Image: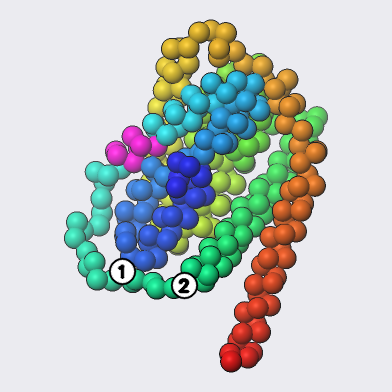
Amino acid sequence: MGMLGGFASGCSSISSLVKTNAITPDEARRLLCCCAGISPAFAISAVGYGMLGNSFVGWALFLGNWAACFFCGWLMSFRSDSPKLRDTNTQTALHTSIGNAFVASVNGAVAKMLTICGFVVIFALFAAVLAPENAPYKAALLLDLLLEISAGCRSAAAEPAGQLFFCTISISLLGLCGWAQMRAILPDSVSLRTFLFTRPLHIALAYGVARLLLKLLPGDAVALTGLAAGERLVLASSLPWESALCLFAFLAVTCQAITSLRRNANPL
């Protein structure tokens, strides 16, 4: 799930495993190093093609990121603090109908989507306030790298040199916004310290693998166009769709809450 849907999906899966006692919190914090990556849609379509103007570069970023994730996860497997054996009878089997499972899945997905979108909007506001348009470019780049992954990659694409390196840093760090999302999704018992400990190694490995993959391609196949490509992402035209999506999510959550209240008031 982390490989297909990104770090939010990976964290959601880890949270489910912890809550059902399938894994311990110690195993979860080490598994996080392997599952908290980026999705191929974001790396290839958004960053590679949309921001850097080359889908091959997006593939290199994606494969480099996940090679680093797997290596860090494998490395952390030797740092176990939990016993090798645990009581497997604590797992609970849940029996429910397909309809109830579908409703619960949609409800959970909408709630997580609202959480993620809320953090993205808040941190985008922080970036706009702390780094206005007339701010020095290097300062704005550093701030975007620290705050939010999409903003960091977008600023890295405008960098005259080192686009691949700064995009790798942004993708590996995930920004404070990504960390806030992980903290909101994961149980409190799952620490993020191990994940933080692996970030320098993750950056070095992801960048090295991405550079190696790009060297295997012809020079003209990995040319970067930067801002010109980024302008193809017409964000203004997508705003109404985003607004409609947020409105739909709000109405879905409201209807679910009203339905729950009615059921509690009249259980028959």
User: Height in image: 115 above or below 232?
Assistant: below
Q: Residue furthest left?
A: 85
Residue occupying the point 47% across, 55% down:
12
Locate residue 52 relative to residue 62 in the image: left or right.
Answer: right
Residue 50 lies within the magenta run: no
Circle 1 SS class: loop
Q: Residue at x 38, y 60 (%)?
A: 17
Q: Where is residue 138 in the image (x, y as percent from the top left)?
A: 67, 25
* Number of residues whose C-alpha sits closer than 10 Å to that of mark 1, classed few (under 14), some (14–19) or many (20 or more): few
Rendering coords of residue 139 (x, y %) = 68, 30
The reply to whether residue 142 is visible in this rendering is no
Rendered image quadrant of residue 261 = bottom right
| The stretch drawn in magenta includes residue 73 | yes
Image coordinates of residue 57 in percent, x first then y, are: 54, 22
Is 134 or 163 nearer to us in this picture? Answer: 163
Q: Is the residue 44 above or below the residue 38 in the image?
A: above
In the rendered image, which residue does mark 1 sit on? Answer: 91
* Colour convention: rainbow
Residue drawn at (56%, 52%) of the image: 180
Sequence order check: which comes first, mark 2 or mark 1?
1
Residue 197 point in image, percent of width and height: 40, 41
Magenta residues (range): 69-75
- Mark 2 or mark 1, whichever is nearer to me: 2
